[in-house]
Image (cartoon, grey):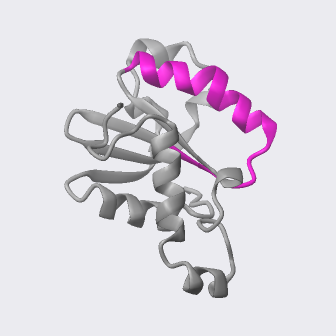
Amino acid sequence: MSFIGRGEVEAKDILQVLFPKSTIREQVPIESLITDEDYEFLDQEIKNHKFDLVLCNGSSILVIEINYCHKEKAAKKWRKIFTKLLIDNGKIPITINDYNCEYLFSDSTKLKKKHPWGAYIDIINELQQQGINPHGTLS
């Protein structure tokens, strides 16, 4: 069973608009993104990990975690394990963090109606802060 977290569906829809020629997969197991040799040495908890979204845009592969109310353990795993592992395997790790997003994770229909581009701006700001250009590659 795969868990789709808060903000993931909307983020996927926005990313598909921003990168219309890309392919986006959901809940992608780590095993399909790294070499067998790297996978072999991981502990079982890490082997069980599925990334929220993987955006394939030409030769660029963005591995995206949507971080809504993640605890420190999850953030530490991302920084200390997943980021290096993904970079070493030619992928670009990206996080969409709730504390940087004013609209994406909001339940307020009033806010979203008043600022319909808000979630787009949240996503674009996160991509830009992490060095992703409008072509879906690192700047």
* Residue located at (68% from left, 54% from top): 98
* Residues shaded magenta: 64-89
Q: Main secondary structure of the magenta part?
A: helix
Please state which of residues 122 and 33 is positioned toward the viewer in this rendering. 122
Residue 48 in which image quadrant: top right
Residue 74: x and y, percent?
72, 37
Which quadrant does the C terminus fall into? top left
Instruction: Look at the picture and state if 87 lies above or below 30.
Output: above
* 55 left or right, relative to 100: left
Q: Which residue is situated farthest in the right direction here? A: 72
The residue drawn where x is 61% and y is 68% is: 103
* Residue 135 percent coordinates (x, y): 26, 44
- Looking at the image, residue 136 sits to the left or right of residue 121; the answer is left
| Residue 95 figure quarter | top right
**x and y, in percent, of residue 132 in the image:** 39, 38
Instruction: Count how many numbered circles sit on residues in the image.
Output: 0
- Given residues 72 and 119, the one toward you in this image is 119
Q: Position of residue 50 (x, y in %)?
A: 53, 42
Q: Is residue 7 magenta?
A: no
Report if residue 69 lies within the magenta region: yes
Left or right of residue 127: residue 76: right
Give the residue displayed 54% in from the left and 25% down from the top.
83
Asked if 2 appears above or below 44 in the picture, the reply is below
On-image quarter of the N terminus: bottom right
Classify 79 as above or below 121: above
Q: Nearer the viewer, residue 22 or 31?
A: 22
